[in-house]
Amino acid sequence: MGGAPLGLMITFAAPVKGGEGGVVGADVFLTKIVEQILTIKLAGGGYAFLPDKSGQVLAHADQAKVM
């Protein structure tokens, strides 16, 4: 068996209601989220970026604005 992939990962999880219950979840690499954000095209020349909860920029098309 190979080792675990390298890189930061975010886990999304939510409870499943009804029946016996449980949890459904998914792991997503942060690099994939950043790629998706940077490919978003907004009308009027706008752009998407990713801030953290304190407002620090984690992903932006202009690398000078990151962190």
Image (cartoon, rainbow, N blue to C red):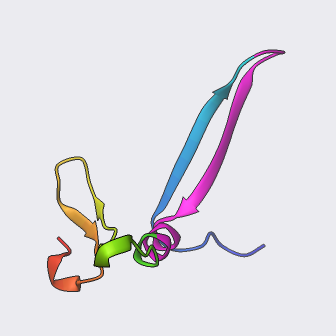
- Give, as a single range, the part of the protein colored magenta: 18-36
Q: Quadrant of residue 2?
A: bottom right
Q: Which residue is more in the foreground, 3 or 25?
A: 25
| Residue at x 34%, y 68% (from the top left corner) | 48
Q: Position of residue 28 (x, y in %)?
A: 57, 60
Q: Is residue 31 rendered magenta in the image?
A: yes
Q: Is residue 65 left or right of residue 43?
A: left
Q: Which residue is more in the foreground, 17 or 22?
A: 17
Residue that sits furthest to the right in the current view: 19
Instruction: Please determine whether, in this image, residue 21 is positioned above or below residue 28.
Output: above
Q: Position of residue 22 (x, y in %)?
A: 73, 25
Instruction: Locate the C terminus by quadrant.
Output: bottom left
Q: Is residue 39 rendered magenta in the image?
A: no
Instruction: Please determine whether, in this image, residue 3 is positioned above or below residue 9.
Output: below
Instruction: Please determine whether, in this image, residue 35 is positioned above or below residue 48.
Output: below
Q: Is residue 20 left or right of residue 8?
A: right
Q: Is residue 47 left or right of residue 39?
A: left
| Residue at x 60%, y 55% (from the top left corner) | 27
Number of numbered discs overlaid on the protein picture: 0
Instruction: Please determine whether, in this image, residue 10 is positioned above or below residue 59.
Output: above
| Residue at x 78%, y 15% (from the top left corner) | 18
Q: Position of residue 12 (x, y in %)?
A: 55, 45
